[in-house]
Image (tube, helix red, strand yellow):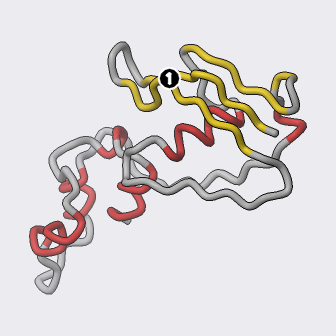
Amino acid sequence: MISIDNITVSYGENNYVLKSLSLSIEEHEIHGIVGLNGSGKSTLLNTLYGLKKANSGKISINQHRLTKKEMAFLATENFFYSGITAREYLSLFNSPDYDIEQWNALFTLPLDDFIDGFSSGMKKSLH
């Protein structure tokens, strides 16, 4: 069993994504993680695998520390130029038939924010 005991993960000083999360994941079962874009799903998986360091708390498997040898992780990466906003990115594909504001009414992305700060789900919506 994987045990997550009171982990807290943040990006920056006060930008908490996971705060005091505790969870037990049983073996030989299929589990899913569901949540809104930006709710911390990818952060949780990155923390489990060790790509992101937890600020506090403990992750263990069968009562010993979880290591990369005991799991597999397939990361999904979308490529975006760094330092540009979502609106700037979408303008690269400008066409008379493409109305950025009309599409964004469906996706509700913060178009004037830098893509670097987007969650994985937000990046997929942008792509």
Q: Looking at the image, which is closer to me, 125 or 23? A: 23
View extreme (bottom): residue: 97
Left or right side of 18 for 7? right
Residue 111 on image: x %, y %: 18, 53
Residue at x 77% of width, y 37% of height:
2
Q: Looking at the image, which is closer to me, 81 or 112? A: 112
What quarter of the picture does the N terminus occupy? Answer: top right
Residue 86 on image: x %, y %: 24, 53
Q: Secondary structure at mark 1?
A: strand
Left or right side of 122 for 47? right
75 is higher (above) or lower (below) than 5: below
Residue 115 on image: x %, y %: 32, 46
Residue 11 on image: x %, y %: 42, 24
Residue at x 22% of width, y 56% of height:
109
25 is higher (above) or lower (below) than 61: below
User: How busy is the neighbourhood of tag 1: few (under 14 within 10 Å), some, or many (20 plus)?
Assistant: few
Residue at x 51% of width, y 22% of height:
8
Report how many numbered discs are placed on residues in the image: 1
Asked which quadrant contains residue 24, the reply is top right
Left or right side of 99 for 116? right
86 is higher (above) or lower (below) than 126: above
Asked which quadrant contains residue 127, the reply is bottom left
Residue identifier under label 1: 20
Q: Looking at the image, which is closer to me, 104 or 19? A: 19
Residue at x 68% of width, y 20% of height:
58
Q: Amino acid at mark 1?
A: Ser
